[in-house]
Amino acid sequence: MYSLKNDYSEGAHPRILETLLKTNLEQSTGYGEDSYSNEAKIFIRNRLGDENVDIHFISGGTQTNLTAIAAFLRPYEAAIAANTGHILVHETGAIEATGHKVISVPSIDGKLKREDILKVLNEHTDEHMVKPKLVYISNSTEVGTIYYKKELEDLSKVCRENDLLLFMDGARLGSALCSKGNDLKLSDFSELTDAFYIGGTKNGAFMGEALVICNNSLKKDFRFHIKQRGAMIAKGRFLGIQFLELFRDDLFFELAENANKMADILREGIKKLGYSFLVDSPSNQLFPVFPNSVVERLQEKYSFNIQEKIGDNNTSIRLVTSWATKEEDVVKFVEDLKNI
Amino acid sequence: MYSLKNDYSEGAHPRILETLLKTNLEQSTGYGEDSYSNEAKIFIRNRLGDENVDIHFISGGTQTNLTAIAAFLRPYEAAIAANTGHILVHETGAIEATGHKVISVPSIDGKLKREDILKVLNEHTDEHMVKPKLVYISNSTEVGTIYYKKELEDLSKVCRENDLLLFMDGARLGSALCSKGNDLKLSDFSELTDAFYIGGTKNGAFMGEALVICNNSLKKDFRFHIKQRGAMIAKGRFLGIQFLELFRDDLFFELAENANKMADILREGIKKLGYSFLVDSPSNQLFPVFPNSVVERLQEKYSFNIQEKIGDNNTSIRLVTSWATKEEDVVKFVEDLKNI
Amino acid sequence: MYSLKNDYSEGAHPRILETLLKTNLEQSTGYGEDSYSNEAKIFIRNRLGDENVDIHFISGGTQTNLTAIAAFLRPYEAAIAANTGHILVHETGAIEATGHKVISVPSIDGKLKREDILKVLNEHTDEHMVKPKLVYISNSTEVGTIYYKKELEDLSKVCRENDLLLFMDGARLGSALCSKGNDLKLSDFSELTDAFYIGGTKNGAFMGEALVICNNSLKKDFRFHIKQRGAMIAKGRFLGIQFLELFRDDLFFELAENANKMADILREGIKKLGYSFLVDSPSNQLFPVFPNSVVERLQEKYSFNIQEKIGDNNTSIRLVTSWATKEEDVVKFVEDLKNI
Amino acid sequence: MYSLKNDYSEGAHPRILETLLKTNLEQSTGYGEDSYSNEAKIFIRNRLGDENVDIHFISGGTQTNLTAIAAFLRPYEAAIAANTGHILVHETGAIEATGHKVISVPSIDGKLKREDILKVLNEHTDEHMVKPKLVYISNSTEVGTIYYKKELEDLSKVCRENDLLLFMDGARLGSALCSKGNDLKLSDFSELTDAFYIGGTKNGAFMGEALVICNNSLKKDFRFHIKQRGAMIAKGRFLGIQFLELFRDDLFFELAENANKMADILREGIKKLGYSFLVDSPSNQLFPVFPNSVVERLQEKYSFNIQEKIGDNNTSIRLVTSWATKEEDVVKFVEDLKNI
């Protein structure tokens, strides 16, 4: 049984393991104040071309989202998210557990637009309603789509004009940046958002997200929030070393490129066989639509998630590739599909 | 500069790294439902001699404490802790951030006693006050002392008689169990507490605590709590594999024994030189009292925490040994102390 | 300027003031444990035909909702509400501030149906999502509609079959029970819901809602929740006396009947003039649709809320009558409308 | 059975009832934006000699405390309170339920001093601990003592020097201001604190506290907090009218003076009979110490709270007078005591 269920089925990129091994018995300062973490931050800041951002390594996406959003909002302020948004659907109400409402905006392609934001603002008029304050987006989105530069600029503008914070969940930012058609680069995010994170867990690390805080007003005392939410790792070096390896050179991007290339093979192969897709996604998540009987046959050899039933006879499934996916396996999938 | 600051200065025990490497490219189920985690739980259950406990691997101590305590209490219920308790002092109000008060009980030796509990109960009489519901203890405690069987039995009894839950923070449980004079074994805790955790971070793992839920009424839906608090790791195997190595054989105990043995060398050496201790601790944390001038000299070659000023001229410092501490280093410390 | 903006523009029914005056200098026990409150509870229990319910008087609707819902749910559990629901829209995220998500269900008529509930349950499948646990309904709803017996029985059934709690916001329960076509009586609610409240604020009291807890498992320690949320009034008699007057005889129903009768005059008058309504509501809230120019003219003499723009030329407004609305005033409104 | 248990045993001052009656059928704007509330605020601002403060009427003390403190703090920030403080002891963890720790400071006389604050600051050094941010004091305190001008100035100074907020619970502020020896006037509080409240519930109102926010940085969006915590009363006029009557002339102070005068009679009478007091309190709460047998005899005719057992044979009780206490009743108490 081969899994295309997600991008965290395997461990970490071997180079990460090597460095963990090499540095293993050195002593280092705890809680993320070690030299590896500091060095990793320098590499990332260099990539961003911005010396002023604050960077914090946190062990997972939900934890990063809840720690950051709860830190950035006052009690009556709310986040706005697409109805596909991870914080709305797949985090067990983690944001609400910190006291904040997440306002849901219907979205087919998983993205938020200027008009969505304005509509929410128009509907929230007084103190009997929450005050929308933070716009949460994911890039790539939960349905595999990506933001283009013009779209992100528009969102950033509407946020700044309306005293809203723009926060980007980058659990799959690597894949977004390496997608065909992508016209954004890492340094754009520190200009256009107030905070965002660079996902390590889904791009070759054992775990770890690099939260980048760009807006000065959000930086103060952030380590208190990390500690209070249980997100401060004693052996912080463990996260630092991983990001050090990912950003010391181009490893982070090479891994994402592999994921995308494997997705390309799947996408082209599936298209060629005449199947359609629920949504047109250029990144490492694909949502092909198959007859139910085909899905059943595929399930005999592959594990993947069901995305959605399409009428009585068809089903959209989710296929995810990663840094660890091998060409032979996706080629085999296409062949198996052909033979069904 | 050699660090005796804590038991998380080094990485993980080499055997853990080997197994991570060996299993690295295998695919596994996410979120802690992988086969490594399941196997690790079997080994731990066998040690406990209890097939019925639920076990969850969580990445750190604060996160385990806040997830468990918030899960176990209703909104108006409170925890009771010694005034040295980690949740009271060193977790940035993590428990309060989940809505619960922690009632502080003065304690010299870091332990709670039957009478402490009864006193708190007597003072909380009606709905204008929180309702004490959970007793939080640490073993070993934050000042290095350990609970003896009779003490734990007494606490357990007073809890059960008064409808209180007994929760034990075992961040340094390994060291406690291997301390001279200890008469408790791992299986006692599943009998005498409602939940406790076995600390990996401070005993040879990169990170990870094994939360053991013994009381049936606390087990339901616990994974929802883990996810909601951001504590569910995508590559859950990473925690599972570490506990698998620690409990596959006696590694967990061997590592704790090393820590204690190194502490013994320090303790004896310091005693022999005529210095006293703030508290008499049989585990891997020592609190010797030195003249300020001695402390300053030591700080030139060693890093450690200041515990407490003792009058104008003396200072108690905290020395912590670990699985990774080497005999030559503690012998050297004693020599250096002698030469001051 | 005459206000049809809401049902809390005037003070309290004069009989309430008389009794407050009469009992004013008597001493009574604090925090709702006084004899007036106890007597009021007996009258309400008699009306409900149920000796076993617990009753608590709380000063307002939002406070009752947040105190009850937070008390009834565990941290990861969520409420389900129609998208018109007061807790979703008009309580500034009060439920989320206690840590709980409110799941929104689209509804035209403000009511929830069996299928709505089942759909939500089907979508919430595992620990990565909140667990739906409580169904929140309002009767009358926020758009003036009411539940009929068959509908409430169906909802109650689907809740019990799926281990869900049914909670009813009765801020305008008086008007619902006195609406034409209503086939529910007060005693039905203690049978069909797990908890509900009887609204005083919008039916003749200065303030006050009577929360009725029917389900035994929800009763324990409820006064702790009330105190913790700041909802326990020192001079609890003030709430008790009001409910005592409302339920000592039929005053509660007489007041609601006046509100409904005044709404009937408005409804019939507006209909006769050929105007339509956004929603067909039999209770004390009406949502007529007028050309914008008519709305502007009405605003010169009357205050009311705008409900919704209907295309470019029309607007639906909300008209609310109350126990204090006089026949001459609503007759005058219809005349004024006719003359526009 | 005559009650000296508290200062909220009776209803409201008759003049309040009269005005409620007189204005009862007028229509007014909801949620505290009515003309009565506005007028009341003008009277209070005039008393304070400060046009710039924001004033909000909230129905009770716990609710005012929790709404204000939660609004003023970021998640990891904590309040400091004397160990007698109402928020620490008698509010069922209401502050913690909003996510904030309350740091307890031992205090015999219920007051905080400059050194107490500095000690807490010294102990809270980094992000592993909460950050002390708000100093909570009560005046008069929970043990009946009052702050003198020099003391309040010192506290205010240490707060401003250390970026701490000073918040004063004035549930019994009337009695404090009318105490013998008091040298503070209402206008001092808007100068020396960041926010405080003037208690109505315990000084002649049915309910209501006037929260005064002096520090500009705390004013923004405060009505959102009030609504979110369930503290926004629909018929806000009900609170406004009460404060209007209390502050239209000197009624607020006259009522407090009566309470104090009655306490004076009790205090002098008890002293004359040779009894001592647990604490020397100049306001409307007294804590005489009686032999247990005397307490038992008093309990036959009077209700009051037990404050503390003093050894095996004596007990300190709490006697509270109010605006409604009559001279004949306290004279009778002293006589009865004499006859025991």
Image: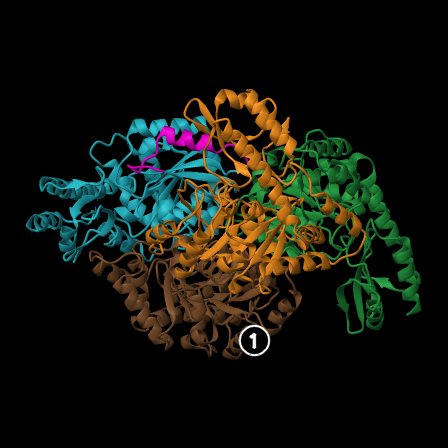
Chain colours: A green, B orange, C brown, D cyan
The reply to whether residue A101 is visible in this rendering is no
Residue nearer the viewer, D287 or D67: D287
From where the camera sits, is residue B169 visible? yes
Query: Which residue range is magenta in the image?
Result: D106-127
How far from the left and from the top, in percent, is residue B280? 46, 38
Q: Residue furthest front?
A: B272
Q: Position of residue C71 (x, y in %)?
A: 46, 60
Q: Quadrant of residue D38?
A: top left
* Quadrant of the rendering where the N terminus of chain C is positioned: bottom left
Q: Numbered disc 1: what chain?
A: C
- Specify the amino acid type for callout 1: Glu
Is B257 on the left-hand or right-hand side of A112? Answer: left
Give coordinates of residue B175: x percent, y percent: 57, 45
Q: Residue at x 71, y 33 (%)?
A: A36
Residue situated furthest left in the rendering: D339
Which residue was labeled with disc 1? C161
Q: Nearer the viewer, residue D120 or C31?
A: D120
Residue A48 against residue C221 in the figure, above or below? above
The residue nearer to you, when weighing C172 against D119, is D119
- Looking at the picture, does residue C101 appear above or below residue D85? below
Q: Is residue C54 left or right of residue C286?
A: left
Mark 1 residue element: helix
In the shown orientation, is residue A195 left or right of residue D286? right
Q: Quadrant of residue C201?
A: bottom left
Front residue of A183 and C123: C123
Residue D79 % position (x, y): 43, 39
Tell me if residue C244 is in the magenta stretch.
no
